[in-house]
Amino acid sequence: MPFTNETEEKQVERAVLVGLSCPGFNADQAADERTMDELRALAETAGAEAVAMRLQRRPAPDARTFIGEGKAEEVKALAEANDASLILFDNELSPSQMSNLEELTGRTVLDRSALILDIFAQRARTGEGKLQVELAQYQYYLPRLTVWNEEMGRLGGGIGTRGPGETQLETDKRYIRSRIQKLRENLEDVRKVRAEQRRRRQKNDLPVVALVGYTNAGKSTLLNRLTGADIPANNRLFDTLDTTTRQLTVSDTCQALLSDTVGFIAKLPHHLVEAFRATLEELEYADLLIHVIDSADPERDDHIAVVDRLIAELAAPGTPVLECYNKCDLV
């Protein structure tokens, strides 16, 4: 389990992208051409090269391999033909499905949530960001730990299945649960510090404006232009994970605080939303939200809907939202 925030020099991994669409799936479960293109961008952001893609449609997911063993064999052949060591799914897989697919294909299999977690682990820079990413990773991997150990033949009943393997698994699970509790306590301290900062801002009567939007909509660039800040702003997904706040001069008599926030994305893993609650709490206390929209994005309307849903979940009811159409020069 790669619980690390260090970026290492390594060869670019070649990946096969797989998605499944079923009639019973909701918007957060289904894969289509649009979400597969986004998966390709996520793979590139993580440092992988997408060399092939398969989008399958079937009445319902297969309980054992999600896509069915026949399609899994096809994906395996595709990976072999393209020398790919990684298979990335646009859907969320159960721990057993992921394990079964790895056994069948002989390749590393990750779902969309694991891929996004990996990107966040690469990008986190501040102590707070690293805490939040580590918490999300542990929450994601804990239920998968049992399956991984079972696949190694270390658990179960009967001769040869008791002893060191089971003891190690329980030790691992106890350690992870203990670490999760410690991380939550540390992040609670972060929330208290943020609450104190908010009280000081309210005492100084400084309104707070939060920039929100789909990932790579241009929030950081806008903050730089408005405040003269020099925070990194690159044309890539999830370039900003850590909240940055700068003072904004609105007029001779009005000052405000402008905060950049982590970008949103469709199918954002719930582990991340929970882990980043301390950061996303800023939306709840903002006096104004500026929804930054990429005007040139062909999926603009869908991305607006994703952000609107998250604003409704995270912001205080009645908080005014100003839509800001960015990148108009690219339209």
Image (tube, helix red, strand yellow):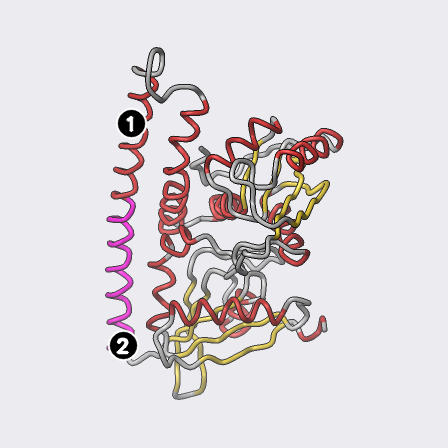
| Residue matched to label 2 | 202
1 or 2: tag closer to the N-terminus? 1
Q: Please give the name of the residue rendered at 53% of the width and 59% of the height, measured from the top-left corner.
A: 26
Q: Quadrant of residue 15?
A: top right
Residue 325, labelled with which disc? none
Quadrant (top left/top right/bottom left/bottom right) for the N terminus:
top left
Which amino acid type corresponds to the residue marked 1 in the rendered image?
Glu
Q: Nearer the viewer, residue 148 or 62?
A: 62
Q: Position of residue 236 (x, y in %)?
A: 61, 55
- Circles 1 and 2: CB atoms closer than 8 Å: no
| Residue matched to label 1 | 170
Q: Is 60 within the magenta?
A: no
Which amino acid type corresponds to the residue marked 2 in the rendered image?
Gln
| Callout 1 secondary element | helix
Residues at marks 1 and 2, CA–CA distance in whole angstroms: 48 Å
Quadrant (top left/top right/bottom left/bottom right) for the C terminus:
bottom right
Q: Which residues are magenta?
A: 183-204
Dot 1 crowding, Cα within 10 Å, few <14, some 14–19, many 20+: some
Q: Please, what is the dominant secondary structure of the magenta stretch?
A: helix
Q: Is 196 within the magenta?
A: yes
Dot 2 crowding, Cα within 10 Å, few <14, some 14–19, many 20+: few
Q: Position of residue 273 (x, y in %)?
A: 40, 56
Relative side of 294 to 248, left or right: right
| Callout 2 secondary element | helix
The residue most toward the front is: 59
